[in-house]
Image (tube, rainbow, N blue to C red):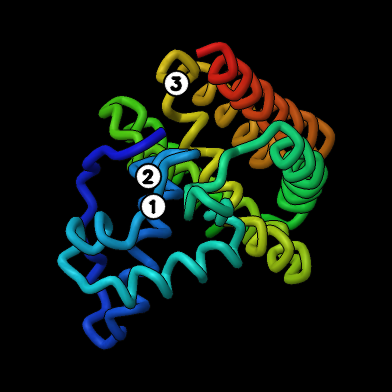
Amino acid sequence: MEYRDPAINLEVDDQSLPLRETVFLTLRKAILTGKLAPGERLTEIRLGNLLGTSRTPIREAIRKLELEGLVTIIPGSGARVAQITEEELQEVMEIRVALDALCARLASKRITEEEKARLRSSHVAFKEAIAKGDQIAITEADVDFHDVIIAAAKNSKLSTILERLADNLYRYRFEYIRDDQRYDRLVREHDIMVQAILGGDEERAAQAAILHVENQRDSILDQIRASYRI
């Protein structure tokens, strides 16, 4: 995949950040949300023109993104957005399916009344985002929904491990949510998790979480394999 012109604007939510950090966060978000697609070539001149910056902060950002595994440097070809591979997806999802099941199980036992209200509210927000069809809004609402469950599990070590996987998971979520034919199933899966957690049904909550992750994994695998045939 070569040049295209995505709409990328510098992230300036925090005016105190130095330019190099702002450029890094902007490019990172563009990769996680698919504005810069897997396999897309990243050149300092082109990205500098898109963002209105010099090449130096672009170069520094690309190096940091390589360390995070979001960019690969290919000898003779330069920097490209890292592909989502079957092997990487399988490895991350094997971890996530176990951790999400544990989160759901613990949340079913430990969730407070206040957290129950937050879970209901986040589920409503997710369905509203689905109805509007905004992919970024849906992805963010999905993150919020699962964050409530993680918080309700009340296990700081578990939360830290999931936080370390956050970038990979966000990228996979966004790829999954690109397929709007999955939206009804997503809502149903969230419905089941909410009912099970609110009802204190640990086993049903864990199984619902497992199915939710496995369906996401299978859908993204289908997308990866379809790209091989293009």
Of marks 1 and 2, which one's residue comes earlier in the chain?
2
Q: Amino acid at mark 1?
A: Leu
Of marks 3 and 2, which one's residue comes earlier in the chain?
2
Identify the residue under disc 2: 36
- Identity of the residue drawn at 22% across and 41% down: 5
34 vs 187, nearest the viewer: 34
Q: Nearer the viewer, mark 1 or mark 2?
A: 1
Q: Amino acid at mark 3?
A: Asp
The 10 Å Cα crowd at callout 1, few under 14, some 14 to 19, many 20 or more, is many
Give how far across and how far down residue 39 sits, in percent: 49, 39
- Identity of the residue drawn at 56% across and 28% down: 191
Identify the residue under disc 1: 42
Give how far across and how far down residue 3 sits, in percent: 30, 39
The 10 Å Cα crowd at callout 2, few under 14, some 14 to 19, many 20 or more, is many
In the rendered view, does 193 fall on the left or right side of 109?
left
Of marks 1 and 3, which one's residue comes earlier in the chain?
1
Query: What number is the disc on residue 179?
Result: 3
In this view, 111 is above or below 91: below
Q: Secondary structure at mark 3?
A: loop
7 vs 92, nearest the viewer: 7
Give how far across and how far down residue 169 sits, in percent: 59, 47
| Residue 6, quarter of picture | top left
- Identity of the residue drawn at 23% across and 52% down: 8
The residues bearing labels 3 and 2 have C-alpha atoms spaced at a distance of 18 Å
